[in-house]
Amino acid sequence: MRHLVPVVAVAGLIALAGCTNPVAGDAIAGDTTPPRSSPSEPAEPELPHSGAPQVPNPAGELSPSICTMLTEQDRESLALEPFPDPYPSEENPGCKWTGDNWSSLEIEVHEDQPAGLSSAYANRDRYDFFEELPPIRGFPAVALGDDRDIEFGDCTVQVGVRDDLMMSVTLENVNGTPDPCGRSEHAATLVASQIPAR
C-alpha cells in the first residue's frame, strides 16, 4: 500500500526552501569568497599634471567683474573702445572690448576647468600652435591656437593663476596683424597686473 505525503507538508518544505535562497552579494555559510563591492571612481590626478608647471604664487580671489581687470590707460594703449561688454556665464565669467579695424580683446576665467593650466597641456595636441611662454607677472603661461586663426591675427594666451584655475586672454583682428601672439602676451601682461595676490 502506497503512503501519500500530505500536500500541506510538501508546501511547507517549498516555502522553507524559498526563504533560504541567498541574495546576490550575501555571504553563504561555508563560502570564503568575499562579497562583491561596487567599482570605485578613478582618482583625479594631482595638480599640476601633463607637464604643466606649478603656479609658484597662486592668486587670491579674482574680481567678479572681469571688466575691471583692464585699466583705462591699458585699454587706450591697446586701442580699444571704452565700453566693454561683460558676458556673464554660469561657468566662465568674462569681458570683451572692441577696437579699431574689427579687433577685439577677450578675457575669460575658466571656472569650468578645475585642472587649471594642466587642461591646456593635456589638450596641447588639439592645437596647431602651442608654445610655452616666460612667466607673466610670475604666472605660468602658454600661447596656443590654430594656424588659420593665427594667420588672421587671432591668438590666445592662457595664464595659470592657480593650479586649479586659468585665465585666457584672446586678441582677435580679422584684418591680420604682425605677431598676434606677441600682442596677446602683451595684453595678458597688462591684465595680470590686476590679479590680486593671495
Image (spheres, rainbow, N blue to C red):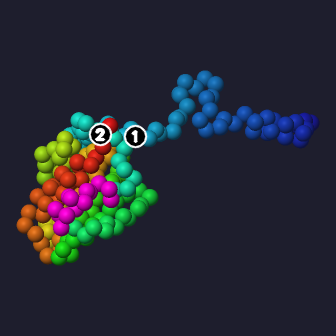
Horizontally, is 185 left or right of 14 in the view?
left
Q: Secondary structure at mark 1?
A: loop
How far across and how far down the image is residue 167, in percent? 28, 52
Residue 88 in sight here: yes
Which residue was labeled with disc 2? 197
Q: Is residue 72 above or below residue 31?
A: below
Residue at image mark 1? 42
On the picture, is 169 further left or further right than 40?
left
Q: Which residue occupies the foreground of this view, 22 or 72?
A: 72
What is the secondary structure assignment of the residue under circle 2?
loop
Q: Residues within 10 Å of mark 2 (few under 14, many from 20)?
A: few
Residue visible at 25% across and 70% down in the picture: 81
Toward the left, the furthest residue is 178
Find residue 30 and name its label: none
The quadrant the N terminus occupies is top right
Main SS of the magenta part reads helix
Residue 113 on the magenta segment: no
The one of 37 and 73 positioned closer to us in this rendering = 73
Name the residue rendered at 15%, 56% in the picture.
Answer: 186
Residue drawn at point x = 22 percent, y = 62 percent = 75
- Judged from this view, the residue extending furthest toward the front is 73
Q: What residue sits 34% from the left and 67% below the top?
A: 85
Instruction: Indicate the quadrant where residue 161 lies.
Output: top left
Q: Position of residue 97 (x, y in %)?
A: 27, 67
User: Of marks 1 and 2, which one's residue comes earlier in the chain?
Assistant: 1
* Magenta extent: 67-79
The spot of residue 150 in percent (x, y) is: 14, 66
Q: Amino acid at mark 1?
A: Pro
Taking depth in this image into account, of 56 and 189 the one nearest to the observer is: 189
User: Which callout, 1 or 2, points to the residue nearer the camera?
Assistant: 2
Amino acid type for the residue under numbered disc 2: Ala
In this view, 22 is above or below 82: above
